[in-house]
Image (cartoon, rainbow, N blue to C red):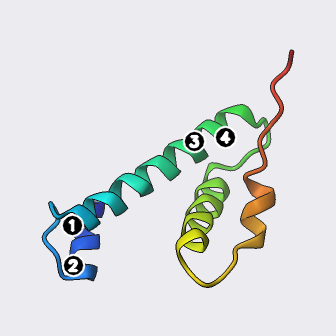
């Protein structure tokens, strides 16, 4: 589904490298946000997903996402 959307946006078929890469990057970001959510008692999954996607966008774009930095700070593991 993400690869199809990315393919339409880039003018490429969904099975081309760029749309697949975008889709797998989005999947990785979603998994990272989900794992962060599992660790945080007061974490909100929607907020984490939003912050994580903004962080990914900032990594490839021109606009920074400062709120994503603090929202994705790792939760320390107990010893």
* Residue tagged 4: 36
Please say if 48 is above or below 77: below
| Residue depicted at x 21% and y 67% | 4
Label 1 element class: helix
Label 4 element class: helix
Label 4 vs label 1: CA separation? Answer: 27 Å
Label 2 element class: helix
Q: Are marks 2 and 1 in contact (CB under 8 Å)?
A: yes
* Residue tagged 1: 4
Image coordinates for residue 28, horizontal then vertical, percent = 46, 47
| Residue depicted at x 58% and y 56% | 49
- Which of the two labelled residues, at mark 2 and mark 3, occupies the earlier sequence position? 2
Label 4 vs label 3: CA separation? Answer: 5 Å
Label 1 vs label 3: CA separation? Answer: 23 Å
* Residue tagged 2: 8
- Which of the two labelled residues, at mark 2 and mark 4, occupies the earlier sequence position? 2
| Disc ID at residue 67 | none
- Which of the two labelled residues, at mark 1 and mark 3, occupies the earlier sequence position? 1
């Amino acid at each position: 589904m993400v690869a199809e959307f990315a393919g339409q946006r880039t003018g490429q078929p969904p099975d081309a490298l760029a749309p697949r890469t975008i889709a797998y990057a989005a999947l990785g970001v979603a998994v990272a946000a989900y794992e962060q959510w599992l660790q945080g008692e007061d974490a909100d999954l929607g907020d984490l997903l939003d912050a994580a996607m903004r962080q990914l966008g900032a990594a490839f774009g021109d606009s920074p996402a400062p709120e994503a930095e603090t929202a994705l700070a790792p939760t320390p593991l107990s010893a």
